[in-house]
């Protein structure tokens, strides 16, 4: 009864906010108008789900990740979720929820990249380790996927350089912060996560085309992406590897000359990244899920993203906002505010001192 009352109160609050902002005049990009939202009422994931089940993560074929590290990941995530107090209960798969399965999330994940780094070098400030995991929050009662993300964490130090296994602790801390942002998202409609990039990591296969993008030459990375795209390939996965490069996986998806095109963006300032995103969006490009990253080259660290242009032009366009908050709570407020203006959270990542949120709004071209 208590859970039902909480849900009802949250629902009424979101309804009142939607009614207050529903008639707001769109003042975005000239020549475009905001599309009508799919519904007039929304409820945030955090307001519906009060418990989370944490399972053991899988490992992508070809990735070397020790068995005891898998157990450590589960243990550290349970510990960090408990410390964050964002859930009333943190459960293992065999445990029952006091809130009932209908109000419980199930967390699963796939380790897509792991580099233990070098402990001796970490003692002197280099030799960082890195882990990248594709995570999925699903509804425990229905099995439906609710939200996905790709999260990267690094191990840069510790006692005598820090043992490689400690990266599971670093990942769990990053996941706990990111989860607070992801649970600001509204409960999705059935089948809403239908894009190829949301289907999850692909195991290596003969039909894939890999493209490496180096922070020393972003332009070459864009040229190589479009060279594969011109042959009918489309981006299906993105994996940052260290701070200086990222691997893109492409699979055949179209028949020339009807092909996808790609734009690689990189900017030192988050405000400039927002401008570049919106400029590319006016040319028909859209952000590719899970490609928001933080890379570093010869001239310092930059925010990075890949955008995609479909083979057939559309009257549907997109507007973007980028937030870089020093506190998780401020990032949550930014997300909630933008969602009331019909933006959706489409990307997150963390820098050493910022919590980044990328917001996207669907707009349509005004008929001339």
Image: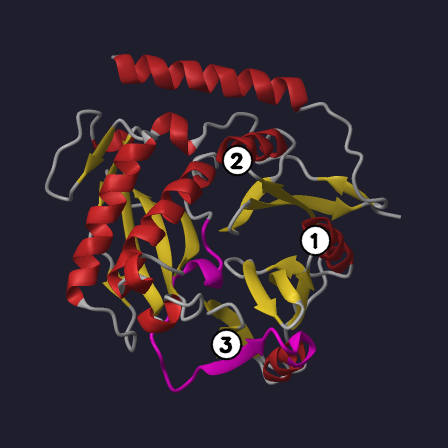
- Residue 258 seen in the figure: no
User: Judging from the image, what secondary structure is the residue with disc 1 in?
Assistant: loop
Q: Quadrant of residue 142?
A: top left
- The residue sitting at 43% across, 52% down in the picture is 149
Q: Residue 273 appears in which quarter of the rendering?
A: bottom right
Residue 75 position in % (x across, y down): 19, 48
Q: Is residue 302 magenta?
A: no
Query: In this rendering, is residue 121 above or below 40?
Result: below
Frontmost of labels 2 and 3 is 2
Mark identifier at residue 250:
3
In this picture, which residue range is highlighted in magenta? 193-220
User: Which disc, if any, is residue 269?
Assistant: 1
* Mark with earlier residue (1, 2): 1
Residue found at the very far left of the displayed protein:
94
Residue 194 counted in the magenta span: yes
Query: Eyeballing the image, is 102 above or below 150?
Result: above
Disc 3 from disc 1: Cα separation = 29 Å
Q: Secondary structure at mark 3?
A: strand
CA distance separating discs 2 and 3: 36 Å
Please, what secondary structure does the residue beneath circle 2 have? loop
Give the class, few, some or many, for how many residues have Cα within 10 Å of label 2's Cα (few <14, many ≥20).
few
The crowd level at tag 1 (other Cα within 10 Å; few <14, some 14-19, many 20+) is few
Where in the figure is residue 7, as x and y percent of width and height? 37, 19
Between discs 2 and 3, the one toward the N terminus: 3
Residue at (55, 45) in percent of width and height: 354
Residue drawn at x 62%, y 39% as measured from the top left? 343
Q: Which residue is mark 2?
A: 327
Res 146 quadrant in image = top left
Q: List x then y, in percent, for residue 114.
A: 34, 69
Tell which of 294 and 261 is nearer to you.
294
């Amino acid at each position: 009864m208590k859970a039902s009352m909480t849900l009802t109160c949250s629902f009424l609050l979101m309804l009142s906010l939607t009614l207050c902002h529903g008639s707001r005049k769109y003042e975005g990009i000239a020549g475009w108008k905001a599309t009508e939202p799919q519904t007039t009422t929304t409820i945030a994931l955090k307001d519906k789900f009060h418990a989370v089940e944490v399972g053991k993560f899988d490992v992508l074929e070809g990735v070397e990740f020790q068995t005891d590290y898998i157990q450590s990941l589960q243990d550290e995530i349970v510990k960090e979720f408990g410390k964050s107090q964002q859930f009333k209960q943190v459960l293992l798969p065999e445990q029952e929820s006091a809130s009932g399965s209908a109000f419980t999330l199930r967390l699963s994940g796939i380790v897509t990249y792991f580099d233990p780094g070098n402990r001796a070098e970490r003692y002197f400030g280099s030799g960082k380790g890195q882990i990248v995991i594709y995570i999925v929050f699903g509804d425990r009662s229905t099995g439906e996927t609710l939200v996905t993300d790709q999260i990267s964490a690094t191990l840069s130090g510790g006692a005598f350089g820090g043992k490689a296994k400690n990266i599971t602790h670093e990942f769990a801390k990053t996941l706990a912060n990111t989860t607070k942002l992801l649970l600001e998202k509204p409960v999705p409609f059935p089948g809403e996560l239908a894009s190829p990039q949301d289907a999850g990591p692909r195991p290596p296969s003969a039909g894939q085309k890999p493209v490496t993008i180096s922070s020393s030459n972003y332009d070459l990375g864009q040229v190589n992406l479009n060279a594969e795209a011109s042959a009918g390939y489309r981006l299906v996965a993105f994996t940052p590897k260290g701070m200086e490069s990222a691997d893109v996986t492409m699979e055949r998806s179209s028949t020339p000359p009807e092909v996808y095109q790609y734009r690689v963006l990189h900017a030192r300032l988050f405000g400039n990244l927002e401008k570049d995103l919106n400029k590319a969006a006016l040319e028909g490009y859209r952000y590719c899920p899970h490609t928001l990253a933080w890379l570093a080259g010869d001239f310092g660290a930059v925010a990075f993203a890949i955008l995609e242009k479909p083979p057939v032009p559309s009257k549907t366009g997109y507007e973007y906002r980028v937030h870089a908050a020093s506190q998780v709570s401020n990032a949550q407020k930014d997300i909630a505010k933008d969602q009331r203006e019909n933006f959706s959270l489409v990307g997150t990542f963390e820098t050493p001192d910022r919590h980044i949120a990328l917001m996207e709004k669907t707009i349509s071209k005004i008929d001339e």
